[in-house]
Image: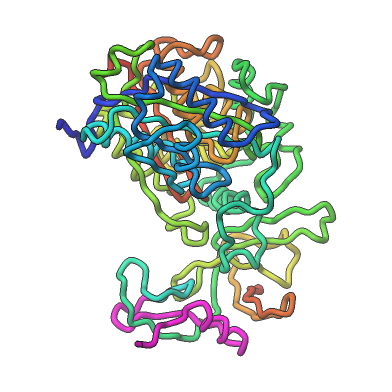
């Protein structure tokens, strides 16, 4: 049986080692996130893991409001420098400071005993 | 077959339409409600249940709901579907039923839905799994996804919270003209702005209801429709587009699949948005009809906020939008798409009492599913539009 890529498991294994990886197609050069077995649109299966630069820009933002304002948190979509967009959170600043267009960089934290990809102001 | 842009224009018609249990419908199951609405729609059409040979439903809590409703009603359908394009499923069913009718595969399609989450809260989570790529960030599902799209629209086009609020206020004013609407007390722009913020920029008043309701429609070919109890409402066009599942994969947060399905459905119908008398556009949140007004071509991209301002989509305004009060003020039991089709049908029949649009001949019903993920547009017309 040929080896099959295990997209999520491999990504999480990298993350647990402190590496934020994304995929790139050798033939098209396109970057892919979230991880999958083929590049969306082309179906290219020649995907390899590459280190993400970690650089990104806030594309959209919302703040989920809680009864205690201290518990409110932001949810953002971040455009990675490599192209793909993902959901995340911007830490390290008050929730209301996060704005569309803000330059951010990736950070791996531990939350609930698990590694989590977040962003902080660049 | 006479197909126009991939659709048999006007050759199938809605001949029965019903709603049931809007607001509160306690003590029964979802399939009880769907069955009741189905019987009402068949009676409205003057068609015996024995004629039904195609069944389309989207059960709220039962993945195999098509079989469930067939069993419940004692039907043996040739076509049974329980598709999973969320609130847009019912507009997709109209497309699929029209094509199956035209092909001669079926002779009578029943589309039915019932759900009572307010009276009978579902145990635990529904039938969708959480995205492993989004869930760790705890977005409110589906609210935060729509909020993210709204944030982008405000950023690019200067859309304001007041303009979002105008959508909720207009819906409420329509609801006040609809005795069946669940929420009819006064609502102002200021009320919406001062309501509890849930996920910026959307307050609780920017969000649709989560109440009980059932609906059904019956479709047959135009020749059979002539013998039904009421004037047939013809399906002039129907098209569908899926662009993503989760909001992080939406190609453009301010352009929905309605920009694909809308122009296709209008081309099939041979009409333009300016010709439409009644627009029923899925209003899960106040941002959604703004996006659909743009994508369907009622106004240019980015102008939706300004379009809805000044009561333009309220009673007496320039465009009759969501005349039943919409998901925001009439009914939203989880998947709202079928109610759009019922209200459009009622308007074109002239059955809408105080909220009736004079001489309504053309209507559009636009369904939305997931998080702006699945968009399906149906253009309906009276016999005069054939």
In-front residue for pair B296/B231 = B231
Quadrant of the image containing the C terminus of chain B:
top left
The extreme bottom residue here reads A17
Residue drawn 41% across and 37% down?
Answer: B56
Residue drawn 40% across and 83% down?
Answer: A4
- In the rendered view, would you say B81 is above or below B109? below
Q: Position of residue B149 (x, y in %)?
A: 54, 51
The part of the chain drawn in magenta is A1-30
User: In the image, B97: left or right of B68?
Assistant: left
Can residue B319 be seen here? The reply is no
- In the rendered view, would you say A58 is above or below B96? below
* In magenta segment, residue A13: yes
Q: Position of residue B291 (x, y in %)?
A: 48, 41
Task: Tell me how the rendering is colored.
Answer: rainbow
In-front residue for pair B230/B348 = B230
In-front residue for pair B124/A57 = B124
């Amino acid at each position: 049986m040929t080896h099959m890529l295990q997209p999520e498991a491999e990504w999480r294994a990298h993350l647990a080692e402190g590496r934020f990886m994304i995929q790139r197609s050798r033939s098209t050069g396109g970057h892919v996130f979230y991880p999958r077995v083929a590049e969306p649109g082309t179906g290219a299966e020649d995907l390899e893991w590459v280190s993400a630069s970690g650089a990104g820009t806030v594309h959209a933002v919302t703040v989920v409001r809680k009864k205690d304002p201290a518990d409110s948190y932001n949810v953002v979509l971040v455009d990675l420098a490599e192209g793909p967009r993902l959901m995340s959170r911007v830490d390290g600043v008050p929730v209301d400071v996060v704005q569309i267009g803000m330059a951010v960089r990736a950070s791996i934290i531990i939350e609930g005993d698990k590694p989590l990809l977040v962003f902080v102001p660049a | 077959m006479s197909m126009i842009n991939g659709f048999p224009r006007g050759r199938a018609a809605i001949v029965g339409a019903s709603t049931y249990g809007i607001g509160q419908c306690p003590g029964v199951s979802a399939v009880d409600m769907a069955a009741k609405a189905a019987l009402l729609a068949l009676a409205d059409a003057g068609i015996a249940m024995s004629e039904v040979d195609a069944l389309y439903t989207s059960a709220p809590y039962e993945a195999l709901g098509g079989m469930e409703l067939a069993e419940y009603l004692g039907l043996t359908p040739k076509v049974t579907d329980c598709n999973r394009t969320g609130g847009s499923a019912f507009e997709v069913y109209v497309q699929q039923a029209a094509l199956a009718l035209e092909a001669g595969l079926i002779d009578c399609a029943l589309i039915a839905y019932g759900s009572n989450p307010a009276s009978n809260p579902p145990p635990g989570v529904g039938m969708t799994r959480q995205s492993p790529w989004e869930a760790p960030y705890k977005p409110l599902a589906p609210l935060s996804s729509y909020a993210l799209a709204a944030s982008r629209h405000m950023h690019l086009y200067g859309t304001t919270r007041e303009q979002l609020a105008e959508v909720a206020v207009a819906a409420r004013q329509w609801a006040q003209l609809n005795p069946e609407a669940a929420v009819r007390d006064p609502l102002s722009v200021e009320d919406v702005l001062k309501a509890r913020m849930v996920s910026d920029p959307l307050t609780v008043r920017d969000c649709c209801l989560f109440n009980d309701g059932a609906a059904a429609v019956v479709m047959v070919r135009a020749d059979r429709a002539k013998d039904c109890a009421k004037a047939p409402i013809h399906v002039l066009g129907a098209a569908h587009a899926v662009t993503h599942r989760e909001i992080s994969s939406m190609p453009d947060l301010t352009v929905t699949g309605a920009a694909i399905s809308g122009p296709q459905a209008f081309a099939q119908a041979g009409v333009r948005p300016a010709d439409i008398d009644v627009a029923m556009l899925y209003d899960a949140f106040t941002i959604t009809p703004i996006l659909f007004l743009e994508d369907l071509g009622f106004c240019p991209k980015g102008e939706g906020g300004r379009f809805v301002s000044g009561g333009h989509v309220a009673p007496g305004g320039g465009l009759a939008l969501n005349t039943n009060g919409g998901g925001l003020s009439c009914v939203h039991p989880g998947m709202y798409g079928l109610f759009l089709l019922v209200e459009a049908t009622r308007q074109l029949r002239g059955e809408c009492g105080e909220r009736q649009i004079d001489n309504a001949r053309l209507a559009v019903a636009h369904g939305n599913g997931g998080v702006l993920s699945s968009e399906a547009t149906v253009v309906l017309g009276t016999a005069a539009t054939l």
